[in-house]
Amino acid sequence: MLNQSAIENILTAALSTGGDFAEIFAEDKHVTAIDMIGGRIERANAGHDFGVGVRIFDGTNSVYAYTNNATPENLIELAKTAAISISGVPKDLGISLVKEDAKSLHKIKVYPADALKSDKVALLKRGYEAAKNYDDVISQVTGYYLDTDQKILIANSEGLLKEDRRIRTRCAISAVASLNGEMQTGSANTGAHKGFELYNEHDMADYGKEAARIAKTMIHAEHCPSGQMPVIIDNGFGGVIFHEACGHGLEATSVSKGTSVYTGKMGETIASSLVTAIDDGTALNQWGSATVDDEGTPTQKNVLIENGVLKSYLVDKLGGRRMEMEANGCSRRQSYKYEPTSRMSNTYIAAGKSRPEDIIAATENGLYAKSMGGGSVNPATGDFNFAVQEGYLIKNGKIDKAVRGATLIGTGLDVLKKIDMVGNNLKMGQGMCGSISGSIPANVGQPMVRVSSLTVGGRKGGE
Amino acid sequence: MKLNLWKEKIFSLGTQTGFSDMELYWQSGRSFEAMVFEGDITKYSVSDEEGLAFRGIYNGKMGYAYTEVLDEDAVIRLISDAKSNAEIIETVEEVFIYGGDNPPTELKLYNPELQKIENQEKLDFLLEVERIANSIDDRVFKVAYNLYGDSSDVVAIANSKGLSLEEKRNSAFAYVSVVVRDGDEQKSGAKFLYGNDFSKFDPRIVASEAVEEALSQLGATSMQSGQYEVVLRNKEAANLLQVFSSNFSAENVQKNLSKLKGLLGEKVASNLITIVDDPHLESGLVSRGFDGEGVSTMRNAVVDKGMLKTYLYNLKTAHVDGVPSTGNGTKASFKSSVGISPSNFYISPGVDSRERLIENIQNGVFITGLQGLHSGANAISGEFSLQANGFRIENGKITTPVSQITIAGNYFEMLEDISGVGSDLEFSLPSGSSAFGAPSLKVNSIMVSGE
């Protein structure tokens, strides 16, 4: 994308006012997006994103500039514009780039550009047919298909020069069930750091059926009762509880500022001893994986919590400067328009020993959250919330009737300690995670987990 | 990028390829953003960017493509991508490239004074916000986010039907979030400012309101579950309106994805509720003279005293219903396909002060925070179940802070259950091409879950 001598000139210009570290991030990305409503393709878009960002550090101060006018002359101008805000004496850092071929960990079989558009359309149709034909109560089905082919180049004044290519695809089906003037929804999706071969392994008809099954279940469901109760959260996207309740609070973004409730707790027991939690950017072809992060550091498997003890934070270069810690391969960004920062990739609670059926049988009364919606957290207070997409009451150790509109709230530190059973059925789910460096693909995961007591919000009120 | 230079080239290749009507949408902008933390400039970001989108009608179907690179190869790719995208479209509705029947209202969206503010002055503003916030109270622990940003943009549309429009705008925002600590307890509070007049950005206001918000929540406890009378503070009422605004889109109505289908002319809310879409609102956060299809925008009362008057239309959905477009065919950015979204969309303010809304409530809740709106509220079902915080209302007065509760209900049932509308209209930060506003609302009964 840029030749070596141009890069060296840009980095030199960036350091001309005394900065002690400079970095270039160039991105060239092709995007395909297709929307389906009611079995018909409604919209199709294709795009070419291209731009370059230049970042300069001066101690723990950071300057960032980006443009999509990527001629070497303009980029030198851009670097100088950014450097204006630093006033110091240039340090003779002697930039000599060593190009390293970051061999991709994640093998791609069918690049999106090589797959026919009609085959992409067929995925949505297949999902539609399965959802529509699931039950008469299904009144509408929508879906989208997305693929991205992102090539990046990262170079910095420490001599790093790396390129990487990330291929991702995702397909989702949503169903609406209507009955007596009410509407309820269900949705299911899959995604991976893979090419079109993903759909040889995943049949979109299964996702269509699943979306329809959830919508149908919810249209017949009662309002959820509220109050404190044991909550069993099933595997897969249920891992969003850890992502929100704890994961964000372990990012250097808030830890380095001392605003996270987890600041200063390294080595302390912060969770039940049944909890081991991992963020693994190296997991082969997973939705949140990459070979190197967006600062060029190889991704890592970081054990965040081991048997309840806090072992690691997620640290990017700038956060690392504040915290006096090494960056550990988790710095990410939506695009060249964002400065990278510490983010999660594929984050999950490791499998435990309990069988799912035993966890349910051991729970006299409570809520079973079979599939989760999303959630959010305030890292300063640790207060989290998340929505249950498909919930059931548990009565006398058995799954009872379906309930809609359940919201789980609590604080991270409290919920981690109250996890009292961990299942053996680890599974991942795909989501988009939004934070200050934009919206990025992230896996969440867990086995079935029981929390001994959580506040459940619902419209039915106390029972 | 010189739009006219490329227009001929692109349209000529488009015509050869078989497109009947074509349109270019060009966006160019510069922005500045800075963040200060404990006296350090932790973010200082400048940008200069532009992008071009093409859309065109090929065999009666609309194909889209965009690019951030503009060279000969990009032109070829734009046309071939747009063609292959048009080829897979299966909708039967007629699509249009607009010829421009009446010219758009010229709005003052650009303030040249804003571009003259030196970056140092903006940094000084941030340093001052931090200094003031820290000096207000000993319990202020950190000024966690202290951000300023401004941008100026030009949007231009040119099409093969001879339409040629351009609009220039600029805006600035400041956002601060503070964390206060008392013993082991931490609370946060935030405040934002938005506009294109930097002289109105008062660091004292931002700092003190954020600190006050955080301090007021210290000592918050949960409360007993039950049905309560609730006053929703203006910003929270605006956030809820945002989630459910998609129901007003004619596209969602026509595709059976809206609760408001079949209700035109019917009562859908309390007669205290009037909802307006006003793209010409002075100091409006997303005011615009024309929409993403080049159609002139106009003010519309969507709900008038509880009665549903119109949906929001673009050209395609308006044709289906046999009505004119309401000028709501929008693109969130040049990259997006044309969809439907409101502009400055708000519940009209009433006459009651906040005190007046509260004074007759014996045992209720004043909600000042709602979280998880992207997941705990479902636009299609109308249902919400959301983490909330605020204050108890006892004997007509605001008393102690409340947190760790949820409120649950159905938005459209709630709109019918409004018994008071405040005079304190406020907008939340814009999202895409829309901004949402509301005054504080008094609701007769909402299920609150806590202990």
Image: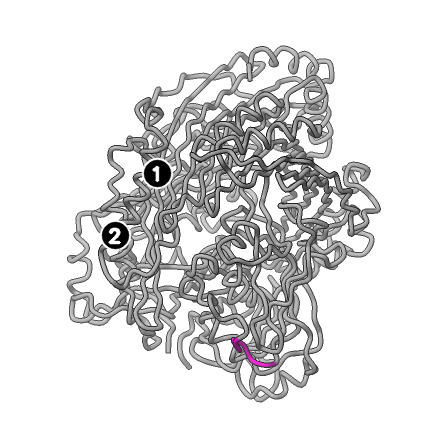
- Of residues A291 and A143, the one nearer the viewer is A291
Q: How is the image coloured?
A: one colour
Question: Considering the image in quadrants, where does the C terminus of chain A appear?
Answer: bottom left
Main SS of the magenta segment?
loop
Residue drawn at x 56%, y 41% as measured from the top left: A21
Q: Measuring 69% from the left and 22% from the top, which residue is drawn there?
A: B74
Task: Tell me if residue B303 comes above or below residue B94 in the rendering.
Answer: below
**Other-residue count near label 2 (Cα within 10 Å), few / some / many at <14 / 14–19 / ≥20:** some
**Residue under label 2:** B209
Mark 1, chain letter? B
- Residue A309: % across, % down: 57, 76
Q: Nearer the viewer, residue A387 or A272?
A: A272
Determine whether, in the image, residue A220 is placed left or right of residue B195: right
Q: Quadrant of residue B62?
A: top right
Q: Which residue is mark 1?
A: B123
In the image, is B359 to the left or to the right of B111?
Answer: left
For the residue marked with disc 1, what is the amino acid? Leu
Three-letter amino acid code of the residue under disc 2: Glu
Q: CA distance from mark 1 to mark 2?
A: 20 Å
Assess whether residue A269 is covered by the magenta stretch.
Answer: yes
The label nearer to you, 1 versus 2, is 1
Q: Residue B404 in the image: x percent, y percent? A: 38, 70
Within the image, what quadrant is residue B426 found in? Answer: top left
Give B43 or B150, whichever is nearer the viewer.
B43
Can you see residue B62?
A: yes
Where's residue B246, x and y in %?
47, 45
Q: Nearer the viewer, residue B233 or A450?
A: A450
Query: For the magenta stretch, what is the residue range?
Result: A268-273
| Placement of the N terminus of chain A among the 4 image quadrants | top right
Locate residue A123 relative to residue B32 in the image: left or right: right
Compared to B3, does A233 lie above or below? below
